[in-house]
Amino acid sequence: MKTPITPELGRAAIRALIKERSPLGPLKVMAKHVGRLFQIPLPGFRPFVVFGPEANRKVLITEREKLLWRNTDPVTDLLRRGVLIVDGEEHDRYRELMEPPLRPAQLPDYTQMMIRQTDRVTATWQDGQTVDMLVEGRKIALLIIMQALFSKDAWDDLPRLWHPIRKAIEFISPGAWIFWRKMPRFGFGKSLKVIDDYLHEIIEERRKRKEGGGDLLQHLIDAGLSDNVIRDQMLTMMIAGHDTSTALLAWVFALLGQHPDTHAKVAEEVNALDKSPLLDQVIKETLRLYPPIHIGNRRVAEEIHFDEGSVPAGGRMFYSIYLTHRDPSIWENADSFCPARFARGRAAPPMSYVPFGGGPRACIGAAFGQAEARIVIARLLQTFHFEPVNPNQIRPYMGATLEPRPGVMMRVERSYGG
C-alpha cells in the first residue's frame, strides 16, 4: 500500500465524513492518500477496498473465481437464493432462465408500456405542484418492472406495497449490523411478510392460469422451480430492478436542476428529434458520477493480488465503482458534470466505466434499465416543464443504492404545447 494510515489521515477522513455527511467522503480521502487498495480501520469492521481498472478487471473477469458473491449479511437474508447472491452453477442456471425477457431484442416491446406507466403517475400531478422525483420515479419504476417481468398491473397495489418495499430497502442498506451482524432487527418482519405474501399470490395466480406469455415469471415456472426459489428471483428483480432505475432517474433530474443550460438543451432535443444524443450522454454521465450500485461486496475465497498489494483469503472486500468513476488519473475534472465526455468518438479506458459491473455477471437488466431511463425521461421532458426547488441541498446517500437525499424537489407545469 502506498501510504500508512496515520492519525492525521484518520482525522482528515472524519472531517470529510462531517462535511459530506456520507461515508463517501472518507473513502475519497483514503483513495487520494493511500491508493487503489486500502483497508478500513474500524473496530470489528476491517474490509479491504479496491478500485480502478485493474481491480475491476480482476474482480469481474480474470480472477472472479477467487471471490464469492454470497455473504452472511441482510442481502442474503432477504434474497435467499436470488440470482444476485448465489455462486457457481446455481447462479448460471438462474441467469440462463432469466435472460430471455431482458435481451435487447425484446426492448421495443416494452416502449409503449413504459410510456403508459409514466403517464399514469404524472396524471396525478397538478400544475404548480412540487413533486419529489425520487418518490415519483420509484412509482414509475415499480409499475414498469412489475408489468414487464411478471405481467402484473401493480397500480392498485402501490398503497399496499409502498411501505413494505421501503422497509425492504432499509433492511439491506448499510447500518449498525455491519459492526454487529447478530444485532436484533426489529420492525421489519411484518413488512417483509407483506412482500412475500404478495409475490406468492402472483405465483399462485399464474400457476392456476397455466400460461402467461414469455415473461420472466413464466420462464421460471416452466423451468420447474419451486415457489420459494421463484419468489427469490422475483424479489431480486423487483428490488434491484426498480431501485436502481429510481436512483438513476432521480439523479438525472437532480443534475439537470443544477445545470439549467443542459436541461434546456435536452428538453429541446427530445421534442425535436426521434433520438436524443445529448440525453444519452446525460444518462451516461449521471451513471458515472452517481452509479446506483456504487460498491460491490465480495468474500475472498482465495488470496488475490493487485499492483498495490494483496487481499488475503477469508476477508471481505469491496470494489468501489464510485471511486473508479471519480478517479482524477482517469477522468478530467472527475467531479464535474460533463455529458460531452461521452460524445461520439470519445471512449473511456477499458474497465474504467462500469456502472453495471462487467464480465459474466454484469447486471442482467443493464440494457433494459438504460432503455427505460431514455424512454421515461424523454416522456417527462416532453410533457412537463420542471423547475428545481432544492438543487443545492441534494447530497448522495449510501443506501441499497446511491440515492439523492433529501429528495429531488421539482415544481411541475404541464407542457400543453409539447
Image (tube, rainbow, N blue to C red):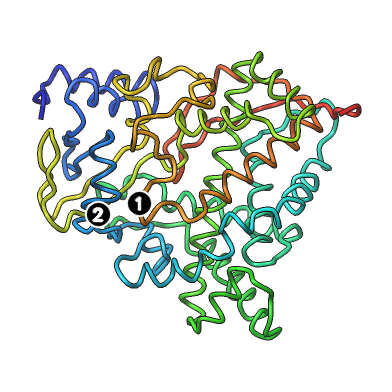
Q: Nearer the viewer, mark 2 or mark 1?
A: 1
Residue 295, how many percent across, how many down? 35, 41
| Quarter holding residue 191 | bottom right
Q: Give the residue number, with chain letter if any, for mark 2.
A: 64
Q: Residue at x 79, y 40 (%)?
A: 122
Classed neighbour count for the residue bearing mark 2: other residues with Cα under 10 Å, few (<14), some (14–19), many (≥20): many
Q: Give the residue number, with chain letter if any, for mark 1.
A: 359
**Residue nearer the viewer, 383 or 25:** 383
Q: Residue at x 43, y 40 (%)?
A: 355
35 w.r.t. 262: above or below: below
Is residue 23 visible to the viewer in this orientation of the structure? no
Residue 108, how many percent across, how many down? 69, 53
Mark drawn on residue 226 = none
415 w.r.t. 119: above or below: above
Classed neighbour count for the residue bearing mark 1: other residues with Cα under 10 Å, few (<14), some (14–19), many (≥20): some
Q: Amino acid at mark 2?
A: Arg
Q: Count all numbered tags in the image, as a single digit.
A: 2
Q: Is residue 113 left or right of residue 137?
A: right
Q: The residue tagged with tag 1: helix, strand or loop?
A: helix
Labels 2 & 1 near each other (Cβ < 8 A): yes
Disc 2 and disc 1: Cα gap in Å? 9 Å
**Residue nearer the viewer, 12 or 177:** 12
**Residue nearer the viewer, 279 or 413:** 279
Image quarter where the N terminus lies is top left
Residue 239, how many percent across, how many down? 52, 55
118 w.r.t. 151: above or below: above
